[in-house]
Image: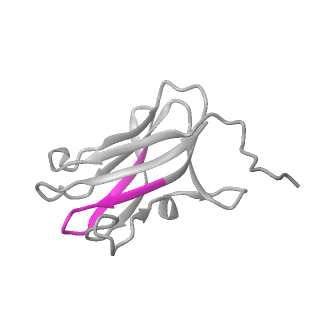
Amino acid sequence: MATTPTYGSAAGPIDLHKTILPADTTSVVDVYDNSAGTASVRVEALNICSNDTSTVNIAFYRYAASASFLLGVVRAVTLSGTDGATARVNALATIGNMAPDGIPVLEIPAGTKLQASSLVTVTNAKTVTITGWART
């Protein structure tokens, strides 16, 4: 048995982050662009925090071959992860798949992107922040 943690030799972590603003309206935005990559990226954490005073629904997409394909929609209730009372939302619980090591993950293959959009415009002066990490 090892006396110190053993981590995979994969590069990383790769920082994932995107803030959805009212100016983005319902446009699809890139969370992570792997379109020029040569290897798949494994997302191991993907969280949503919202200081919006309304519940927001964030649609996640995989962009490939000049089209965005819906992975699923994740609901972030009012003030998720921003008020100290409501937890941030683990998006992988909804859009991820269970990996052999028992954690939910999402693969972003080489040549594709992970994208997101709010189903309705975020309230004026509020934000929805998507953060996480990945490994190649």
Say which quadrant the N terminus sits in.
bottom right
- Count of numbered circles on the image: 0
Dividing the picture into quadrants, the one containing residue 81 is bottom left
Dividing the picture into quadrants, the one containing residue 136 is top right
Query: Measured along the vertical axis of the image, is residue 52 above or below residue 131?
Result: below
| Residue 12 shown in magenta | no
Left/right of residue 126 with respect to residue 12 in the rendered view: left
> Residue, x 12% and y 54% (percent of image)?
125
> Residue, x 72% and y 57% (percent of image)?
101
The single residue placed furthest to the bottom in the displayed view is 85
> Residue, x 17% and y 55% (percent of image)?
121
Percent across and percent down for residue 91 are: 45, 60
Percent across and percent down for residue 11 are: 63, 34
Percent across and percent down for residue 119 are: 26, 58
Query: Measured along the vertical axis of the image, is residue 90 above or below residue 25?
Result: below
Question: Which residues fall within the magenta stretch?
Answer: 46-62
Left/right of residue 94 with respect to residue 124 in the rendered view: right
User: Is the image coloured rainbow, by chain, by secondary structure, or in one colour?
Assistant: one colour
| Residue 61 shown in magenta | yes
The single residue placed furthest to the right in the displayed view is 1
Left/right of residue 75 with respect to residue 1 in the rendered view: left
Percent across and percent down for residue 102 are: 68, 61
The single residue placed furthest to the left in the displayed view is 124
Q: Nearer the viewer, residue 121 or 51?
A: 51
Magenta: predominant secondary structure element? strand
Query: Measured along the vertical axis of the image, is residue 34 above or below residue 121?
Result: above
Q: Nearer the viewer, residue 70 or 83?
A: 83
Query: Measured along the vertical axis of the image, is residue 35 above or below residue 119?
Result: above
> Residue, x 51% and y 64% (percent of image)?
93
Dividing the picture into quadrants, the one containing residue 31 is top left
